[in-house]
Image (tube, rainbow, N blue to C red):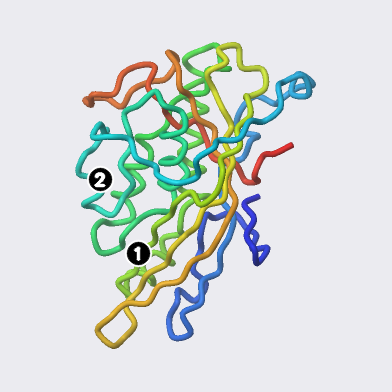
Amino acid sequence: MMTSTGSHRGLLWAVVGGVVLVAGIAVLVAAAISGNAGPTPTSSQSESPGPSTSASPNSTGAGDAYVDPTAAERGWVPEPITTDEDVYIRAALAAASTFDTQRSTREEWLAYLEGWFTPDVRYTSDADREADTRAAKVELREGVVLPEQDWEALAEQDGRVSAAVSGPITTMPVPDDPSGDMTIATADVTLTFTQADGNGGESSFDEPVRVSVQVLCGEGSVPAPGTDQRAGDCKVVRYFTEPLER
């Protein structure tokens, strides 16, 4: 489960408790897609190489190539068109907790996030891959992102949330992945909550969490239809309920 300095727990990336009404308090909760949605790792996991650590914890920059260049105008993280695993992981870790209630509806944001997903290549049939991706998207809606009632309450405060990787990224291979193209990445992420302060200005505060995401950067990835993305470009497979580390 995503962990924070306050040991917040739950099934959401960030649930604003009381939605920062008068006291301005947010209840940070961990989120992510259950690892049970995919094939169960076997003992081969112990035979995999140990995790590696990315040297640079800073920018998520991906040049000028994005699936939707207008995403930032809606308050979202643009999905980079890239085969650079590090660049894509940084964007993916931020995307599921970055939104602006004044620039889009929750449904628009969710539809956008669903476009980041690609099937898990460990499944051998198209039917199984499609079913797994559908399950991942359902879990995104029901167990990962901010619930609708909390979005609406945050919107009353003109609220928004932005997320960014704030520490080294640790990676490890996915068990039983014949392609070798999937990676599980874990990192500290800082969520910044911003809202109207009632005096014509804004107030902000940060919450640290630790999260994991599984990505695919290889020929098995399925590009977003009608975009410049190609098979082989990086995509998200799932988010996890706990940071996966050894």
Horizontal and vertical percent position of residue 26 = 51, 71
Q: Is residue 118 left or right of residue 17?
A: left
Please give left or right for residue 142 compared with residue 6 in the image: left
Left or right side of 64 for 195: right
- The circle on residue 23 is none
Amino acid type of disc 1? Arg
Please tell me in which quadrant of the rendered image residue 170 appears. top right
Q: Describe the element under mark 1 as helix, strand or loop.
A: strand
- Look at 65% across and 67% down and name the residue there: 6
Position in image of residue 209 (x %, y %): 57, 56
Q: Which residue is mark 2?
A: 71
Location of residue 233 (image quadrant): top left
Residue labelled with disc 1: 160
In the image, residue 91 lies at what x, y percent?
41, 41
Of the residues under marks 2 and 1, which one precedes in the sequence? 2
Is 12 in front, or is 125? 12
- How far apart marks 2 and 1 lie (CA) works out to 15 Å
- Left or right: 83, with 41 as reference point: left
Residue under the point 70% across and 26% down: 40
- Work out whether residue 132 or residue 200 is closer to the camera in this orientation and state it: 200
Q: Residues within 10 Å of mark 1 (few under 14, many from 20)?
A: many
